[in-house]
Amino acid sequence: MAKLKPEARFFAVFCDGGYTTNAPIEELYEEDALFATHHNGEPLEPGHGYPLRLVIPRLYAWKSAKWIRGVEFIAEDKPGFWEENGYHIYGDPWREQLQLLFLAGRSRL
């Protein structure tokens, strides 16, 4: 198992099609977070995220990803696909974490 550098506080995941996702590294240590290569004992099919899929149900699948090609552990947060498009890093509907662009007066509506 690879050992992370002490300064690694966030992760960034890179997927086919240019999709990326990010979060604090602590999210990967939660009980419901997993990287999967198989489902029900069978290798993932392309439609379900082959070759590697990240699932974090607790985060409303907001940070889940299919077709993973790389993972980077980084000291500073790097915005993922949704954050680059104006969304909050968590987007918790119960906390009303709205689009950052809307809150900054730059709504895309």
Image: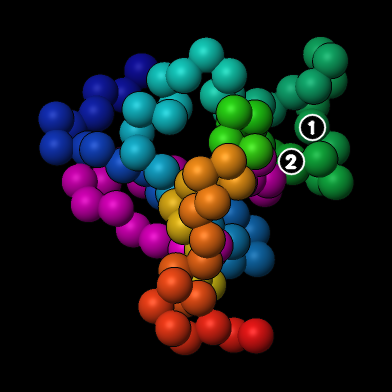
Judging depth in this view, the residue of 63 and 99 nearest the camera is: 99
Q: CA distance from mark 1 to mark 2?
A: 5 Å
Q: Pinpoint residue 80: horizontal percent, then vertical percent.
A: 47, 59
Residue depicted at x 79% and y 26%: 43
Q: Does residue 11 appear in this view?
A: yes
SS at circle 1 = loop
SS at circle 2 = loop
Considering only vertical position in the picture, is 91 above or below 37?
below
Scheme by which the image is coloured = rainbow
Q: Pinpoint residue 17: horizontal percent, then vertical percent.
A: 65, 66
Judging depth in this view, the residue of 83 and 41 nearest the camera is: 83
- Kindly indicate the quadrant of the structure image that contains residue 35: top right
**109 sits to left or right of 84:** right
Amino acid carrying mark 1 in the image: Leu
Q: Is residue 81 magenta?
A: yes
**108 sits to left or right of 24:** right
Q: How many marks?
A: 2
Judging depth in this view, the residue of 1 and 107 nearest the camera is: 107
- N-terminal label among 1 and 2: 1
Which residue is tagged 2? Answer: 50
Residue depicted at x 67% and y 48%: 67
The part of the chain drawn in magenta is 61-84
Q: Are marks 1 and 2 in contact (CB under 8 Å)?
A: yes
Which residue is tagged 1? Answer: 44
Look at the image and tell me in which quarter the N terminus lies. top left
Residue depicted at x 31% and y 24%: 2
Q: Pinpoint residue 5: horizontal percent, then vertical percent.
A: 17, 32
